[in-house]
Amino acid sequence: MDIDPLADNAPPRYAIESDEEDEYNPLQESSPETLSLPEIKVIGDIPLKCPLILASGNGGKYWAKGCSLGKQTGAVYVDETQVGLVYHPSWSRSNVIVSETFARLPVAYMHFYAEKLVKELKPSSVVLLDTYPTPTYVLPQPISLQDAPIRYLSTHQVDPIIASLAERFSPPNFVHSTTSAALLSYVASSVAPSNSDSESKATLLLLPFPRIPAPAPKILGRSDFSHLSEDEYQWSRDTMNTIQKLLLVAVGERLDDSASWHMPVNRSGSRSSDDVPARAKPLVDDGMYI
């Protein structure tokens, strides 16, 4: 009986493609990935056809802590996870949604989220508050974080007050917050050429942020309330009062004393000081609990 001396040995190295798995194989059948549509619900006693202020992420959370938003009037759920808190403050005729402060949306859900908010609430105009990372913002001459301005994007000609207090978000830069980008894009794309009234207006206001944001998660996790009392960055009172003014101007209102932004109260009961460096400021209590 003949015995093959190589039968139990590994094949020669030249017979193995070391990067075979990295190359496209047209004969290999790929298993199709099915994307299930998220179930998005907007609940609560929320007036319709009002301006909408959507505050997202770190900037939105910090802004909401210094506002007298009043009692929560509703919520936005995505697959049973609370993603947005809805308010209707006494100092504005707008609905305010504080979004993604304790649960971030996957990229695949963001268009559906934007579409649901617009179709459900039917806002007469939309203004978004978010951040942009100053380390990656492209400019002819680099500037420090302290000199970085508030920036804006808009689907229409903005009020002169916005143009005087903020700078346009210019190419080749792009918005890292995909939720804000999705909502701005949805509002812009849903405008008919013959319809240029106030229902088509959307403005994005961006606070300078010293870090590059983490990428969006691949799946939607559970709500995490453990970090609500912490702030990754604290802007100055002047900056936040400016952003408060711009938010109201963007929805056709004006800032008065009742709508002023106030420094959040920290755990010792005193207000944070503008003289303390931003990253060294004490932790603050959250004002968004139900």
Image (cartoon, grey):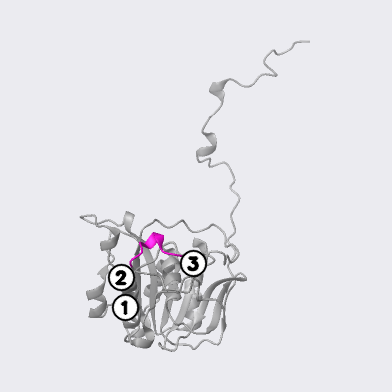
* Viewer-side residue, 136 vs 228: 228
- What kind of residue is marked 3? Met
Q: Nearer the viewer, residue 122 or 262?
A: 262
Residue assigned mark 1: 246
Q: Which one is earlier in the sequence, the residue at label 2 or at label 3?
A: 3
- Splitting the image into 4 quarters, where does residue 126 fall? bottom left
Q: What amino acid is at disc 2?
A: Tyr
Residue numbers of the magenta segment: 275-282
Question: Is the Cβ of the residue at disc 1 closer than 8 Å to that at disc 2?
Answer: yes
Q: Nearer the viewer, residue 24 or 147?
A: 147
Cα gap from disc 3 to disc 1, whole angstroms: 25 Å
Other-residue count near label 3 (Cα within 10 Å), few / some / many at <14 / 14–19 / ≥20: some
The residue singled out by tag 2 in the image is 152
Helix, strand or loop for disc 2: strand
The image shows residue 114 at horizontal and vertical percentages of 47, 72
281 within the magenta span: yes
Q: Residue at x 49, y 61 (%)?
A: 107
Q: What residue sits 67% from the left and 15% below the top?
A: 6
Q: Amino acid at mark 1?
A: Leu
Q: Quadrant of the N terminus?
A: top right
Which is more foreground, mark 1 or mark 2? 1
* Left or right of residue 59: residue 46: right
